[in-house]
Amino acid sequence: MIRSLIDLLRNLQSEEDCRLFLENIRWHGVPVCPHCGSKSEEHYKLTNGGIFRGLYKCKDCRERFTVTVGTMFEGSHIPLQKWFIA
Ligand SMILES: [Zn+2]
């Protein structure tokens, strides 16, 4: 158990990895809009300077969201890794 957690953290070296991991456990890989509840693989992925950083735009209500909306991560600058350790 502890060992697998250490292995997990070893695989979550970047914010990007943590985000993908969170998306998997929260959405099972399919983005869910927290504003209207729409679940779709076709939500738009918004890029910043050509780089996708987890910001989606709902194809139904057109609100923007990330996997951390509505969680303790929202608006915080605490690295995601610390959350997994806690
Ligand atoms: Zn929506």
Image: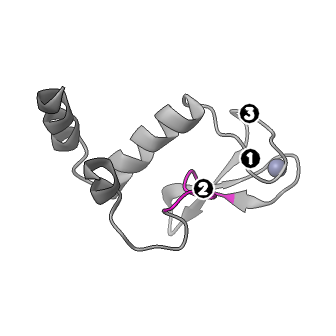
Query: Mark 2 sits on what residue?
Result: 66
Residue type marked 3? Ser
- Residue 14 in which image quadrant: bottom left
Please report contact status of discs 2 and 3: CB closer than 8 Å, yes or no: no
- Which residue is tagged 1? 33
Of callouts 2 and 3, the N-terminal one: 3
* Residue 16 sits above or below residue 40 on the image: below
Side (left or right) of 13 relative to 68: left
Q: Residue furthest right?
A: 61
- Name the side, left or right, on which 60 lies relative to 3: right
**Mark positioned earlier in the residue sequence (3 or 1):** 1
Count neighbours of disc 1 (C-alpha within 10 A) and say few if under 14, some if 14 to 19, many if 20 or more.
Answer: many
- Provide the secondary structure element on which disc 1 rests: loop
Q: Label 2 crowding class (10 Å Cα cut-off): few <14, some 14-19, many 20+?
A: some
Q: Quadrant of the N terminus?
A: top left
Q: Looking at this view, is 6 or 39 the one in front?
A: 6
- At x 20%, y 43%, the residue is 9
What element does badge 2 sit on? Answer: loop
Q: Would you say 26 lies left or right of 22 here?
A: right
**Mark 3, residue position:** 40
Q: CA distance from mark 2 to mark 3?
A: 14 Å
- Residue name at image x 68 percent, y 33 percent: 41
What range of the chain is rendered magenta?
A: 65-72
Residue under the point 62% across and 32% down: 30
